[in-house]
Amino acid sequence: MLFRNRFLLLLALAALLAFVSLSLQFFHLIPVSTAKNGVSSKSRKRIMPDPVTEPPVTDPIYEALLYCNIPSVAERSMEGHAPHHFKLVSVHVFIRHGDRYPLYVIPKTKRPEIDCTLVANRKPYHPKLEAFVSHMSKGSGASFESPLNSLPLYPNHPLCEMGELTQTGVVQHLQNGQLLRDIYLKKHKLLPNDWSADQLYLETTGKSRTLQSGLALLYGFLPDFDWKKIYFRHQPSALFCSGSCYCPVRNQYLEKEQRRQYLLRLKNSQLEKTYGEMAKIVDVPTKQLRAANPIDSMLCHFCHNVSFPCTRNGCVDMEHFKVIKTHQIEDERERREKKLYLGYSLLGAHPILNQTIGRMQRATEGRKEELFALYSAHDVTLSPVLSALGLSEARFPRFAARLIFELWQDREKPSEHSVRILYNGVDVTFHTSFCQDHHKHSPKPMCPLENLVRFVKRDMFVALGGSGTNYYDACHREGF
Ligand SMILES: *[C@@H]1O[C@H](CO)[C@@H](O)[C@H](O)[C@H]1NC(C)=O
Ligand SMILES: *[C@@H]1O[C@H](CO)[C@@H](O)[C@H](O)[C@H]1NC(C)=O
């Protein structure tokens, strides 16, 4: 099984690289010759790099392309892989919304012209796109907790609004949904034929892009998208911490982490020079340009193959982009080393992980509710969960990223339940801090549920290094 997994991982990677090198050549932003060099030098790069043997990541263009996650043909994935005597009990899916329009404008430039209406004759396309639009345009009835009712059900502006989901974003999640449907419904029969609303648990933040991403995924996933069986709850916090959001120590970790970020930026003279040049081009003070978070807008230009903005003073260009993107990668590397973000993440992710194991434990008791849980969320949701699980080597959540917890029962030993963790289709179960190296002394290709439960109930707090052994104490530690 392990060898098979490795083999499939290699296959998936080969497909990915083939796609990346293809799309690089089509990008008019990148000269063909340098693109080829860029890819071949990185062809050993793995999706979950091995910290011991991997060279440090330094190719900003390669990283940016992964981040865009431009929909391609048939994706390979490892979801649902288990020996025959295992039965799938429940599935818990955390997604980041799909490709969106920037949240910020670069001051004094024309914003990129991207069309957020959904049309069949524009790429990327998905066979369910028209049916999705026609179904959504019929309206939803009472399928949402307030204030979600006021949000549009699909993107629909000829010039995207700030933060709006694009057609690319919709297609990414139709594709995610279809992939999960083939595996979990068709192959593993997770839902019975006469499934009902109780069997789904759906939760989204109050942004149109997360609601719409969730709807697109469900539209690709469910055999019949019946509004009567859909109920989306509203989550006000990007950490999905519901009633347990108050945690002063978490905020202290975050402040220290932000200070670390600031100091790293000051040390990077090339970055400061780049911001200075760009500020001159758009004719605003450097401080104002930096505050406008230009990388967000530049990534949109990059992912949509739209040239960077120009003024009569010159153009923002690929070199500027590379410097800022490279700094982002370095920032993530230092973030891992300094562990302040880890402290923030352990406390930030506890409530949602606690909720998830609660849901899993109810399923192990034979309850048939909430077999499929979907949390439609943001990078600032997925990132702390990944970090808390010990998956610090995982890449920053790309558009339409998916993190999945699968719960399995061994039919030969029905009292034994196990979990698998998958990030963007890659099995990362044995990279987590609660199951590292487990496979070396167990023949089972997954992790005992008890490991995850012990981690969430206790070891998360031990990892924080204080004396707290529960969430409340860890959040209120004095003198931190
Ligand atoms: C990017 O745009 C250029 C022209 O602006 C075009 O020639 C090229 O095919 C486009 N690439 C992709 C991947 O759409
Ligand atoms: C964890 O979940 C249990 C129920 O499963 C709940 O009683 C408890 O309050 C939760 N703790 C936190 C900190 O969310």
Image (cartoon, rainbow, N blue to C red):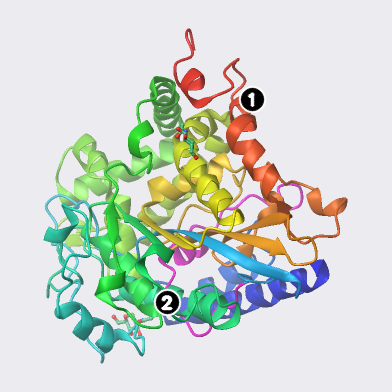
Badge 2 marks a residue whose secondary structure is helix
Is-magenta flag for residue 65? Answer: yes
Q: Closest to the observer: 269 or 414?
A: 414
Quarter of the image for residue 268 reads top left
Residue drawn at 43 percent across, 52 percent down: 325
Q: Closest to the observer: 43 or 165?
A: 165
Badge 1 marks a residue whose secondary structure is helix
Quarter of the image for residue 196 reads bottom left
Q: Which residue extends farthest front? A: 366
Q: Looking at the rendered structure, which numbered label has been put on residue 221?
A: 2
Distance of mark 1 from mark 2, alpha carbons?
Answer: 38 Å
- The residue that label 1 is drawn on is 462
Up-down: is 285 above or below 418?
A: above
Residues rendered magenta in the picture: 49-77
Tell me where residue 293 appears, x and y as whole percent: 27, 45
- For marks 1 and 2, the one nearer the N-term is 2
Quarter of the image for residue 26 reads bottom left
| Left or right of 220, for residue 454 | right
Tell me where residue 185 appears, x and y as whole percent: 52, 78
| Left or right of 60, for residue 375 | left
The amino acid type, in three-letter code, at marker 1 is Val
Q: How many neighbours does mark 1 have within 10 angstroms: few (below 14), some (14-19), or many (20 or more)?
A: some
Tell me where residue 444 appears, x and y as whole percent: 80, 60
Up-down: is 363 above or below 354?
A: below
Disc 2 within 8 angstroms of ligand 2 (CB): no
From this viewpoint, is residue 461 visible? yes
Tell me where residue 480 appears, x and y as whole percent: 49, 12
Q: Closest to the observer: 451 or 101?
A: 451
Residue drawn at 60 percent across, 15 percent down: 467
Is-magenta flag for residue 138? Answer: no
The quarter of the picture showing ligand 1: bottom left
